[in-house]
Amino acid sequence: MELHAMDRYIKSLIKEAGHKIRNSFISDITIETKSDANDLVTNIDKEIEQFFIERIRRDYPGHRIFGEEGFGDAIDDLSGVIWMLDPIDGTMNFVHQKRNFAISLGVYEDGKGKLGYIYDVVNDDLYHAVEGGGAYYNDEKLKSLAATSIEESIVAINASWLAPNKYIDHEAAIGLVRAVRGTRSYGSAALELAFLASGRIDAYVSMRLSPWDIAGGAVIAGEVGAVTTTFTGEPANLLKQDTFIAANPSIHNRMLSDYIRLK
Amino acid sequence: MELHAMDRYIKSLIKEAGHKIRNSFISDITIETKSDANDLVTNIDKEIEQFFIERIRRDYPGHRIFGEEGFGDAIDDLSGVIWMLDPIDGTMNFVHQKRNFAISLGVYEDGKGKLGYIYDVVNDDLYHAVEGGGAYYNDEKLKSLAATSIEESIVAINASWLAPNKYIDHEAAIGLVRAVRGTRSYGSAALELAFLASGRIDAYVSMRLSPWDIAGGAVIAGEVGAVTTTFTGEPANLLKQDTFIAANPSIHNRMLSDYIRLK
């Protein structure tokens, strides 16, 4: 693959999609629910995914597309080139806040992350990486993550994972909340990965994320040294919904061993 | 009081302070801890408070000042005019993220909120209100809050309040997390009040806030119809640290009656 040509192409495509999303604020947005009453989707999520797919199919035939809204391909293996796309990551924020959501895109070849993009649409902030070339926040190169400790860390975790749930021992997760310096929750996995990559938080954990939520961010975070795995320490799952942790390498192991207990 | 003249004066003062804070990013910031290892304060918090106090004492003699860093007056009653100031609300964000913190200022006369300001320093976004004149986000007038339900609400609550604590029944608070559409946590009470006033969240709760954390935001949120009280439903405490809820009026009562149980 010509990564640098693709990189330029993708940045242009993402900016165009961002423009469409910002324009949508002046028209009516249709909101539906998916798996449950709080799992929102809008006509804009669908239109933006279709916009990407149309362009990718025309300009990169042979590549496959794994998208949140399901207009792409059915993916059950990681062979070849796959674009993993969430057209609007943080749809609840998009609907309620008109901000704090992102376009998330990762391009993988035979399961290996090659290109990563997280575009904070309203702030016009692009986090991006080409494998091996470092990660960037707009034109600024992001520094490798400096070592820290659990006690000095800010961890992004949604409060819902501290309620009894079927994925993890919530009491152990409460122990994590008490051990760290602070917790935050922003409502967009992609932005939380971008904040990890830029050192604003030190870890992000979620019990249930899909490949398109993490694909772009994993490439970006990896370029500054962050570790991204499932809760069992396996590489992040790029084929189906799974647990997910992205963390500063100095705290990743201890977070899993001391505070995350899978049911 | 000449509220509109003071309003212009304060906006100018806040912008000047914001400029000083942004400039501080290029110099060294000295970090100390206060009540515990996670209660941070920096030389910039102190310098900015002193900057405000110097100006207010010169230009508004006779007014009293209640500031987080303690350079103001000892306040044990609400008579006369009191400026309630947090020079940097969200110091942990200031230190770790270099963003997501705010200057928070409320001016009260005989206990009644007259002027309110929350300045998101890095984004150069000013939320402001003059009593009776509505609330503004920069030059844009904020709408009165539309009625909502607990089930459709986004509530800002820090995960630490879902761990066993001495203030509230954390199991009941977990019930709140499960009942609402979503939760968020941004790490700055002032910004969370600004987000409430601008309709991005529907409520904000905290077990422990000080008058300067809430003084500016209460004026702004009040102008769009939000209700701000302690957990017992009393008016927000402007003399000492206390529990605090600010909410859309359509959900305030039910949040307190169904989900907040004081110990």
Image: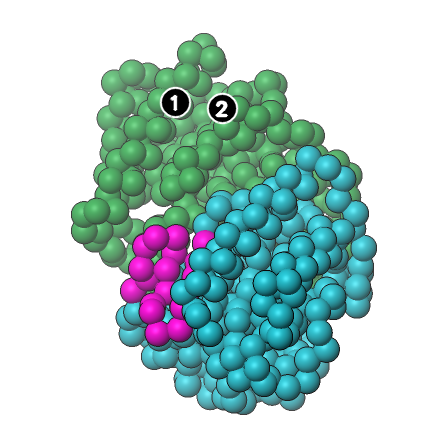
Chain colours: A green, B cyan
Q: What residue type is disc 1 on?
A: Ile
Q: Residue at x 69, y 48 (%)?
A: B95
Instruction: Point out residue A257 in the picture as x, y percentages from the top left corner.
Output: 75, 52
Residue B49 placement, left or right of B190: right
Q: Chain of mark 1?
A: A
The answer to whether one can see residue B78 in this image is: yes
Say which of A221 and A28 sits in front. Answer: A28
Do the residues bearing badges 1 and 2 touch, measured as CB atoms within 8 Å?
yes
The mark that comes first in sequence, 1 or 2, is 1
B120 above or below A61? below
Residue B1 placement, left or right of B214: left
Dot 2 crowding, Cα within 10 Å, few <14, some 14–19, many 20+: many
Say which of B92 and A243 sits in front. Answer: B92
Instruction: Point out residue A228 in the picture as x, y percentages from the top left corner.
Output: 62, 38
Q: Residue at x 45, y 25 (%)?
A: A107
Q: Residue at x 47, y 64 (%)?
A: B6
Q: Quadrant of residue A104?
A: top left
The residue that disc 1 covers is: A10
Secondary structure of the residue carrying tag 2 is strand
Secondary structure of the residue carrying tag 1 is helix
Q: Chain of mark 2?
A: A
The residue that disc 2 covers is: A115
A263 above or below A45? below
